[in-house]
């Protein structure tokens, strides 16, 4: 049964009928006692027995927090763990340790996030907290940490001109406190609401070509005399506008080139949003891959490194190629995604959702995500072929033919 979330904070405030259960859904309800107190309860069945779990008292335990606790309890039940026994166990642990420290709660929070994170992101989060937060807050009992202490940590980062790091640290501290609220280790969240007290970070501009600059770039690409695999990788990323890290780690087993509708299936663990991404391949993209196979077809990786074929091409290879072509501070490979998006949207030929899906900008609504997957793949295949033809038409205007030679550094 899914939660129906019937209640509102206003309904909770107005509730005054003693003994009446105001149902929110999925077993959770608000019960008004004779003394006027309002208690959150959740009825559930475990191993055939009906049980009731106490979730707190309104308004100290807000509606949103009660729902989080209910959802966590439901997850435990699905894992065949009795939430009431789990609560007792946690109470015993807290009683033994009395006050659990921020670093310990952070470790528990991270363990529950790693399945959703890439290995690199998990490493980045851990390193940033250890470097910037733990020195001041790590050994502090989490229920004693005050807002001024959190702000002091963030101000220290700002004093080093690390404004982006300060905002990210605040977000992560808030997430740890939200987790600690659910586990019952504290009731406050001193990191919440501090955004306006911080200096807004300056957004780094991702250099991108303008659509009108693309023909000249394509012309210069055909004159590139570096490593042939680098040239082909640049061509392939132009045709597919995937992220550079997705291209660099591509493996031959991910490609289905023999079917009528050739496709590249990028596995979830390599995607930013941890979701499989389908890339319909144009005939031009397939042609590039056929040429790449002459170089790396016997390897696991499609674009291996020059020095060690068991490792991906260096993350700087394509960037340095752009530098050699005269595009230092003017373009990045990531910027090809932006120029493709601009041209495809301005063409008026393609549904915006198809373009967003091809860019792997995932729709968070599960129903709409399912629709996107089933309905937009056919249109995306046509769109990717149109895009490749559009690039070729630009090259034809410059009387460009596909590069077949070049020096190997």
Image (spheres, grey):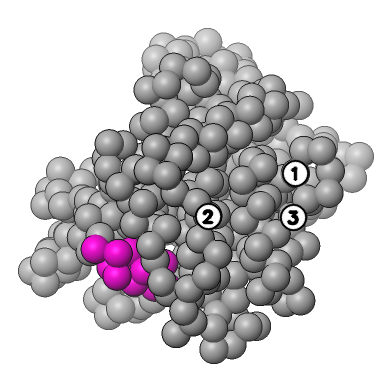
Find disc 2 in the rendering and name its residue.
402
The N terminus - image quarter: top right
Q: In the current view of this chain or complex, which residue is farthest to the right?
A: 48
- State how far apart marks 1 and 3 are (Cα): 8 Å
By secondary structure, the bulk of the magenta-drawn segment is best described as: helix
Label 1 belongs to which residue? 262
Is residue 64 visible in the rendered image? The answer is no
Q: Is residue 208 magenta?
A: no
Magenta range is: 316-326
**Residue 255 tag number:** 3
Residue 127: horizontal and vertical position, in percent?
39, 76
* Residue at 42% over, 58% down: 222
Quadrant into which the C terminus falls: bottom left
Residue drawn 77% across the image and 38% down it: 261
In the rendered structure, the answer to whether residue 405 lies left or right of residue 92 reads left
Query: In the image, residue 245 lies at what x, y percent?
Result: 50, 63
Query: Which quadrant of the figure has residue 115?
Result: bottom right
Q: Earlier in the sequence, mark 1 or mark 3?
A: 3
- The secondary element bearing badge 2 is classed as loop
Q: Tell me, yes or no, whether the two marked residues, 1 and 2, touch with CB atoms within 8 Å.
A: no
47 and 102: which one is in front? 102
Image location (x, y in percent) of residue 295 = 66, 74
Q: Earlier in the sequence, mark 2 or mark 3?
A: 3
Can residue 403 be seen from the camera position used here? yes
Packing grade of label 1 (10 A; few <14, some 14-19, many >=20) is some
Find residue 401 and report its horizontal and vertical position in percent.
50, 51
Q: Are marks 1 and 3 in contact (CB under 8 Å)?
A: yes
Q: Residue furthest front?
A: 399
**Relative to residue 33, is residue 380 drawn left or right?**
right
Q: Nearer the viewer, residue 52 or 406?
A: 406
């Amino acid at each position: 049964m899914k939660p129906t979330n019937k209640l509102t904070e206003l309904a909770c405030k107005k509730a005054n009928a003693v003994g009446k259960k105001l149902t929110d859904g999925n077993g959770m309800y608000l019960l008004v006692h004779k003394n006027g107190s309002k208690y959150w309860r959740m009825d559930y069945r475990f191993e055939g027995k009906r049980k009731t779990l106490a979730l707190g008292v309104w308004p100290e335990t807000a509606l949103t927090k009660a729902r989080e606790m209910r959802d966590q309890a439901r997850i435990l039940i699905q894992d065949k763990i009795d939430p009431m026994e789990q609560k007792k166990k946690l109470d015993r642990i807290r009683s033994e340790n009395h006050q659990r420290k921020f670093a310990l709660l952070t470790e528990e929070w991270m363990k529950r996030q790693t399945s959703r994170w890439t290995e690199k992101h998990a490493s980045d989060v851990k390193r940033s907290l250890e470097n910037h937060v733990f020195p001041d807050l790590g050994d502090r009992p989490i229920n004693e940490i005050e807002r001024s202490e959190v702000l002091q940590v963030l101000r220290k980062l700002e004093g080093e001109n690390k404004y982006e790091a300060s905002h990210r640290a605040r977000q992560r501290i808030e997430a740890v406190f939200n987790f600690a609220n659910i586990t019952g280790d504290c009731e406050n969240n001193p990191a919440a609401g501090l955004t306006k007290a911080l200096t807004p970070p300056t957004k780094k501009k991702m250099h991108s070509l303008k659509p009108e600059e693309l023909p000249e770039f394509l012309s210069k690409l055909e004159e590139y005399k570096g490593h042939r695999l680098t040239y082909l990788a640049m061509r392939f990323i132009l045709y597919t506008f995937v992220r550079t890290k997705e291209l660099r780690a591509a493996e031959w087993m991910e490609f289905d080139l023999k079917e009528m509708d050739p496709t590249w299936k990028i596995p979830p663990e390599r995607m930013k949003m941890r979701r499989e991404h389908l890339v319909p391949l144009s005939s031009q993209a397939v042609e590039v891959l056929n040429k790449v196979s002459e170089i790396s077809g016997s390897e696991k990786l499609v674009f291996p490194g020059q020095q060690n074929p068991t490792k991906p091409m260096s993350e700087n290879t394509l960037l340095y190629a752009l530098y050699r072509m005269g595009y230092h501070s003017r373009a990045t490979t990531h910027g090809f995604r932006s120029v493709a998006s601009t041209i495809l949207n301005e063409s008026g030929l393609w549904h915006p959702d198809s373009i967003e899906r091809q860019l792997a900008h995932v729709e968070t609504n599960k129903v709409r995500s399912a629709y996107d997957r089933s309905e937009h793949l056919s249109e995306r295949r046509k769109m990717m072929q149109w895009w490749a033809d559009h690039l070729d038409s630009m090259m034809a205007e410059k009387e460009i033919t596909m590069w077949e030679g070049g020096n190997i550094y």
